[in-house]
Amino acid sequence: MQGLFFESDTGVRTVIRLIVVLIGFWTAWRAGKAVAESWNDYPLVIVYTLLLAFAMRFLHHALFDGPMLSVFYYVIDVVVLLIFSTAGYRYRRTKQMVNNYYWLYDKTSAFSWRKKN
């Protein structure tokens, strides 16, 4: 599994890579949340995620000597980061809709709402 998503690692580099990946996940979550907080539309989340995936590719290249311009790894980064940024966006947007329009909407889950009957 290690060779599928990343180049092979040993020792301390694995811990550093884990920290970098967690920072990337957290940044994606915060980017999605920030877009929702400013009441912008979802396509801006995609743009931010594409830029963040490029930054993550650079970190993997600079810190771990991974391929910088690999389409395969870039697409994997985009997909995984998009999951986290979308989750952050939907989580915050659900809170906004339910709290700001409490007479119109009920919360159905952490990521969705519905109209009140």
Image (cartoon, rainbow, N blue to C red):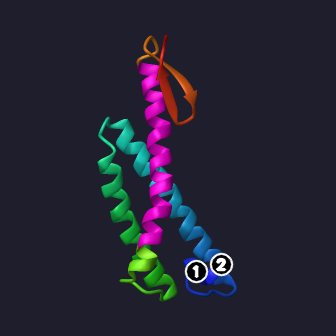
Residue drawn at x 49%, y 10% as measured from the top left: 117
Crowdedness of circle 1 by 10 Å Cα count: few (<14), some, many (20+)? Answer: few
Q: State the CA–CA distance, disc 1 to disc 2.
A: 5 Å
Looking at the rendered image, the quarter that the N terminus falls into is: bottom right
Residue drawn at x 60%, y 84% as measured from the top left: 3
Residue 37 position within the rendered picture, expressed as x and y whole percent measured from the top left: 38, 37
Query: Magenta segment, which residues?
Result: 75-100
Front in this rendered view, residue 38 or 7: 7
Q: Which residue in the protein does label 2 denote?
A: 1
Q: Name the magenta segment's main secondary structure.
A: helix
Q: Which residue in the protein does label 1 denote?
A: 4
Q: Amino acid at mark 1?
A: Leu
**Is 4 within the magenta?**
no
Left or right position of 53 against 2 = left
**Residue 88 drawn above or below residue 1:** above
Please tell me whether mark 1 sits on a helix, a strand or a loop: helix
Circles 1, 2 touching at the beta carbon (< 8 Å): yes
Residue drawn at x 35%, y 43% as measured from the top left: 35
Q: Amino acid at mark 2?
A: Met
Front in this rendered view, residue 70 or 23: 70
Please tell me whether mark 2 sits on a helix, a strand or a loop: loop
